[in-house]
Amino acid sequence: MHKLKLLLLIAMSSTAVFAAPVEESATVALDNQAFQKFDDQFYLGWGATYGNLTNAYGENANYGMTTIGFGVERLFDMGLWMRFDGTMMIGYSNFNSSNPNAITAPLGQNPSIANLDMKIGYAFPVVKDTLLVTPYGLVGRNTNLSSNSLNNNMSTGSDGTTTPTINTTEDYFLTGGIGGRIEYIPADWVELYFDQNALYSSDQSQPTSTYSSMSNFSFTSTLGAKFNVWQELQLGASAYYTRYALVNSATYAQQYQLNPQNDIGFMATIGLTY
């Protein structure tokens, strides 16, 4: 009988020892639960961007474009955060201000016709159910169908007409960089967030010796909100500002070419949480 009691006591002690880590693990998983209600989502969106272009002579032009967007986001129990975003341009207008050459080179270095970007980071709960900080890395492939790539890939025939020399769908940037985002939940149906990144885009259009590569740095600040309005339905809105800095100076052939300086924009989204 005494041996039986001793065995039961050992078994109960062992159960308690193993139960503690399980309970602790469950608590850790719940640290992100409030944010998972917003970040586990996929969406469709519509947005607009307004930007400024300039050339080596200080001549300016402005442009506006409309885009559609789509994406999916996931915050895992362990803290891993992933987000995939895609955009495609559906409309573009050039607003010439002081540059007569804007008419012959309307695209400038923006817009990007189609973008695909992925962010991967790790979330740190600063204040449980209220404040979350996530540093991340970004990789992407962004179309570079711009004045530089179009001019570089054009050849003039004997009759004076110009035609593309290669498939322009091969003109793109490979983008990489780092960033961070802060998420704040003021109420159980709304989340506010701020996202800041610094990116380097490498020009893959292989310009000839008369054209400099249009590789550039960009810095984007985004302020947004997500609203869980009804069951799994989520509405979102964000506004952003981007500043560009070209890596290389323009060659003589690019003196009149328009390059981006900055742009502002917004996107409204509708999606489902899961």
Image: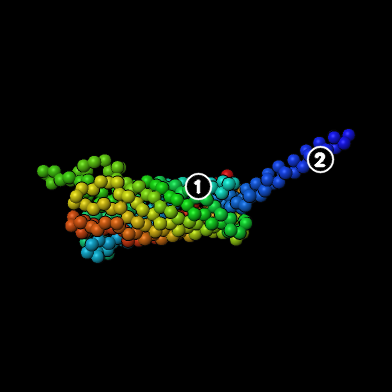
**Residue 152 seen anywhere in this rendered image of the structure:** yes
Is the Cβ of the residue at disc 1 closer than 8 Å to that at disc 2? no
Which numbered tag is attached to residue 82?
1
Marks 1 and 2, how far apart in space?
A: 46 Å
Q: Amino acid at mark 2?
A: Leu
* Residue 222 on image: x %, y %: 45, 59
Taking the spot 34% from the left edge, 59% from the top edge, the residue there is: 244
Dot 1 falls on a residue whose secondary structure is strand
Q: Nearer the viewer, residue 218 or 274?
A: 218
Which numbered tag is attached to residue 9?
2
Q: Amino acid at mark 1?
A: Met
Q: Nearer the viewer, residue 59 or 213?
A: 213
Which numbered tag is attached to residue 164?
none
Q: Quadrant of residue 164?
A: top left
Taking the spot 52% from the left edge, 50% from the top edge, the residue there is: 122
* Residue 15 on image: x %, y %: 75, 41
- Of the 4 image quadrants, the one containing the N terminus is top right
Taking the spot 29% from the left edge, 56% from the top edge, the residue there is: 247
Crowding around mark 1 (Cα neighbors within 10 Å: few <14, some 14 to 19, many 20+) is: many
* Residue 184 on image: x %, y %: 56, 59
Dot 2 falls on a residue whose secondary structure is helix
Q: Furthest residue to the left?
A: 158
**Residue 224 seen anywhere in this rendered image of the structure:** no
* Residue 201 on image: x %, y %: 34, 51
Q: Furthest residue to the right?
A: 1
Taking the spot 74% from the left edge, 40% from the top edge, the residue there is: 14
- Give the side of residue 2 with respect to residue 207, left or right: right
- Give the side of residue 49 with respect to residue 43, left or right: left
Q: Which callout, 1 or 2, points to the residue nearer the camera?
A: 2
Placement of 234 over or under 1, stated as above or below: below
Crowding around mark 2 (Cα neighbors within 10 Å: few <14, some 14 to 19, many 20+) is: few
